[in-house]
Image (spheres, rainbow, N blue to C red):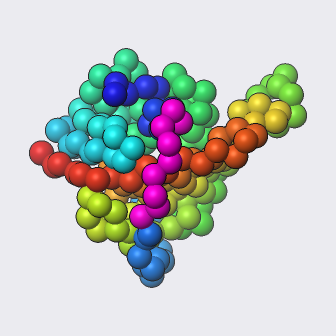
Amino acid sequence: MPLRTSLAAALLALAPTAAVPATAPAAEAEAAWSFACPAPGTAATYAPPVTMRHEGTAGGPLLCRVAGQRTPWVLGLAGDEDPSGRALLETLERGFFPARPGAVARRPPRPGGTGNAGATELTFAGYEALEVPAGRFEAARIDFRYQRSADRVQTMRAWIDRATGVLVRMELEEGPNGRRIEAVATTLTRP
């Protein structure tokens, strides 16, 4: 399956998979964390089946080049031309990193929008030990809430491996129907 604007968009068309339980949360470290794109040549395959091959950074530490994509991906989660990807990038650019567990960044609603449309909230929930089919990881968990329109909210929880910058698990809820999609890394190949 070719990648779309975001991993989330690619997964919305697929049925959810069974959850892979995380291990008990690791002791919360106070150390600040900054995201770095995966090294060129890193590849991750997810269930449902989507493979992301990383090619390095694209114009800054928050934008990653992914093979087969026209535009860079923000944190490896969403293309920067996708509305949720743009919202995520604009929120991050407000000075989120380096972040300590509990850090929160917000972006106000779009001017002239209806209700809270365009508003975002990004939270660094902390560090968690996580086990998925691709292995055991010490992951940084990012929670993102995006008000797509007056009546449509997208929420995403993403676990990013601290050592490689690779997304190892993602949960997404989108739209008024409360559809829930989950992706987990099944393989991780390092250069």
> Which residue: 70% across, 38% down?
175
In terms of depth relative to the viewer, which is nearer, 161 or 60? 161
Secondary structure of the magenta portion, mostly? loop
In the picture, the quarter occupied by the C terminus is: top left
Residue placed furthest toward the top: 70
Q: Is residue 55 left or right of residue 95?
A: left
Q: Is residue 45 placed above or below 102 in the rendered structure? A: above
Which image quadrant is residue 154 in? top right
In the picture, the quarter occupied by the N terminus is: top left
Q: Is residue 68 magenta?
A: no
Residue 188: image location, x then y, percent: 22, 51
In terms of depth relative to the viewer, which is nearer, 3 or 15? 15
Which image quadrant is residue 111 in? top right
* Magenta-highlighted residues: 12-20
Q: Is residue 56 left or right of residue 170?
A: left
For the image, the number of numbered tags is 0
Residue placed furthest toward the left: 191
Query: In this rendering, does residue 106 appear at all?
Result: no
Residue 135: image location, x then y, percent: 26, 64
> Which residue: 48% across, 37% down?
14
Query: In this rendering, does residue 158 appear at all?
Result: yes
In terms of depth relative to the viewer, which is nearer, 88 or 25? 25
Q: Is residue 19 magenta?
A: yes
> Which residue: 20% across, 43% down?
42
Residue 121: image location, x then y, percent: 67, 48
Q: Is residue 36 placed above or below 5 in the rendered structure? A: below
Residue 146: image location, x then y, percent: 67, 41
Q: Is residue 70 placed above or below 53 in the rendered structure? A: above
> Which residue: 50% across, 48% down?
16
